[in-house]
Amino acid sequence: MTGPALNLQSDHMKRKTGQDRNITRNWRPATQAVRGGTARSEWGETSEAMFLTSGYAYDCAGDAAARFSGDQEGMTYSRLQNPTVEMLEQRIALMEGADACRATASGMAAMTAALLCQLEAGDHIVAGRALFGSCRWLTDTLLPKFGISATNVDARDPQAFIDAVRPETKLFFFETPANPTMDIVDLKAVCDIAKERGLTTVVDNAFATSALQRPMEFGADVVAYSATKMMDGQGRVLAGAICGSETFINDVLLPFHRNTGPTLSAFNAWVVLKGLETLDLRIRRQSENSLKVGSFLEKRVPRILHPGLASHPQHALAMQQMAACGSIFSFEVEGRTQAHALLDALELIDISNNIGDSRSLMTHPASTTHSGVAEEKRIEMGISEGMLRFNVGLEDADDLIEDLDRALEKAGL
Ligand SMILES: *Cc1c(COP(=O)(O)O)cnc(C)c1O
């Protein structure tokens, strides 16, 4: 078979002959999650096709030359483009309400690329102090090696961003809710501060996803994801994504992405496409379960950090920015011994450091996800020795409550 059978075009929005870009763009997010970005091959398959190919063949040498010069639309090499990956990129962009998206092999590939593609020696960034462990490694260790300095601030306080800005500051980088302290950043306030100063805002939106929170509606410029988490949602593959304006993606990110190669595999892209179809359902149900389980735990443990509960100091702000509380919360017991004892007493809930999975998973950040962060930094971030982070899954909430009840008793808590 020769010639491009697919209807993919560089104006990637026209996915079927005659399909009206304005209609598809205006579909609501839950519709985009199921159908956004779909491009059918000549076979008319209903489920997206998986294109496991590294290269593409051309009908003639002239076509190859035209493809490379950009005069002819089409694909040249899967580090640069792949039909399955492109369907995922389109879907994520449409759900986010972003102009464009680029997928990556993991969430950390997305964070690293989103920062390094736009920074250079001499630049400064202001980042949240409560960040995913490896994101903290980027700001503390990697960026300084290349002459880029970072100030980590208490991102709950918008004034902290203002105070940390220097003449050489280029961007703000934070997550909300933050991992694992569940700190909430006031998206509107912080994005406004950045805009007034001509700075770029990069938001890691892994916990909420576009199903619950769309940072661009509050003025964020770039939204980056670990798609490993809620987007896959079933603990199968690693993936990441970066959303932004057409100019940012094409002119700033693409040269970096294409030449350094943090590309997502077509297989993993396909798995995430399937995951997105149920994202809206899963995240709402997991949020409900998280609220039920959180309400139970609140009466049994000394401290709980749950954005969906009124006891969270930023509960009102969280509910203003997010459509629901999400699947994750943290709580504290007395210390590391008690935290480990509780984990060891669980029967149903797994001890695991992943999140966003349909299974309930619990971890002790100080000895796992954040063990690489120096102890004094952990304390400053708000990660205590007794803190446990809980991803509430899709099981029956009553079974989870019974498991916790039994484990608390067994651990003598
Ligand atoms: C998991 C996670 C990452 C890293 O994503 P990977 O897919 O594991 O590389 C980054 N930020 C946040 C908030 C995360 O939860």
Image: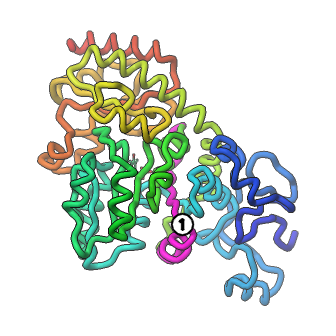
Could you tell me if residue 16 is visible in this image?
Answer: yes
The answer to which of 213 and 354 lies nearer the viewer is 213
Could you tell me residue 199's position as x and y percent?
A: 36, 68
Could you tell me residue 232's position as x and y percent?
A: 55, 43
Outermost residue, left side: 376
Vertical side of 185 occupied by 312: above or below: above
Render colour scheme: rainbow
Q: Which amino acid does the dot numbered 1 rest on?
A: Ser
Could you tell me residue 351's position as x and y percent?
A: 36, 30
Q: Would residue 23 be found to the left or right of residue 260 on screen? A: right
Q: Quadrant of residue 122?
A: bottom left
- In what quadrant of the picture does the C terminus appear? top left
Q: Residue at x 15, y 43 (%)?
A: 379
Question: How many residues crowd mark 1 within 10 Å: few (<14), some (14–19), many (20+)?
Answer: some
On whether residue 240 falls in the magenta region, the answer is yes
Q: Would residue 183 be found to the left or right of residue 106 on screen? A: left
Q: Residue at x 59, y 63 (%)?
A: 99
What is the total number of numbered labels drawn onto the structure image? 1
Q: Residue at x 32, y 38 (%)?
A: 182
Q: Quadrant of residue 113?
A: bottom left
- In what quadrant of the picture does the N terminus appear? bottom right
Could you tell me residue 280's position as x and y percent?
A: 59, 36
Q: Which residue is mark 1?
A: 245
Vertical side of 255 occupied by 269: above or below: above
User: What is the span of residues highlighted in magenta in the rendered image?
Assistant: 234-259
On whether residue 246 falls in the magenta region, the answer is yes
Could you tell me if residue 146 is visible in this image?
Answer: no
Q: Secondary structure at mark 1?
A: loop
